[in-house]
Image: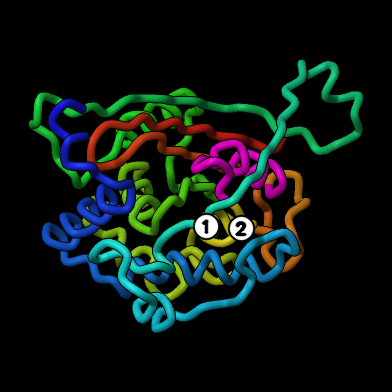
Amino acid sequence: MAFELPFGPATQNLYGMVAKRHMYEFGTTSEQLAWIKVAASHHAQHNPHAMLRNVVTVEDVVSSPMVSDPLHRLDCCVMSDGGGALIVARPEIARQLKRPLVKVRGTGEAPKHAMGGNIDLTWSAAAWSGPAAFAEAGVTAADIKYASLYDSFTITVLMQLEDLGFCKKGDGGKFVADGGLISGVGRLPFNTDGGGLCNNHPANRGGVTKVIEAVRQLRGEAHPAVQVSNCDLALASGIGGALASRHTAATLILERE
């Protein structure tokens, strides 16, 4: 902090730096990042509470004003108030509630710090939290039917997809392109409430909302237009801090019982 704060790093600048490095290392493009926003907007149109409900195109995203190169305005999350609540009950109590049961299969959390300056911007702490959660759950990324991924910026989603093992490092751009994250179209539906990019982003956070939408999907209670067919295993993942400096990651794997 003593070396960073005098230069006044802003959050968007830190994430822009990560996106720029990913592009340099792997050839990721702004158009590929834009597909993440496009997917979020396709889902948000069905959420009456979402701040941004208009469906956007890749051209809309890359034509929006530049905020911090290479991130455009539509690569950035909304800013909002908000909140969420969860009730975790013992199995014998949960079975009395006559609601579809969702249980925790695996969890993982990890920090990534400045490492004395020896830091690689191309990966996040999800590279540690994800494997821990999958190991505890006894499943792999290929088993996941739906993913709730923290989406402060489009690059945040791309990094988690790679680090959680949904695709190889550097292949995130190809994975999300052409609707790869759109429910009913892509291989991995994500953030079917619109996420932080379109729905809400309370107090610069949004972890609990990711768990809530994952539970909705597992219960079959998401909006019919975005409900994932036979959704029996879901993942929620969050990043707290800044990808370019120090942050933590938490990964949760949930299963419909």
Mark 2 surroundings: few (<14), some (14-19) or many (≥20) residues within 10 A? many
Looking at the image, residue 203 lies above or below residue 223: above
Residue bearing mark 2: 199
Q: Position of residue 173 (x, y in %)?
A: 30, 64
Residue at the spot 31% in from the left edge and 43% down from the top edge: 163
Identify the residue position indicated by label 1 in the image.
78
User: Which secondary structure class fits the magenta region best?
Assistant: helix
Q: Residues within 10 Å of mark 1 (few under 14, many from 20)?
A: many
**Residue 18 is inside the magenta segment:** no
Q: Are marks 2 and 1 in contact (CB under 8 Å)?
A: yes
Q: Give, as a single range, the part of the protein colored magenta.
A: 201-217
Image side of residue 237 versus residue 46, left or right? left
In the displayed structure, 49 sits above or below 239; it is: below
- Tell me residue 164's x, y (percent): 37, 42
Q: Based on the displayed image, in which of its 4 quarters is residue 158 positioned? A: bottom left
Which of these two is toward me, 244 or 40?
A: 244
Q: Is residue 147 left or right of residue 29?
A: right
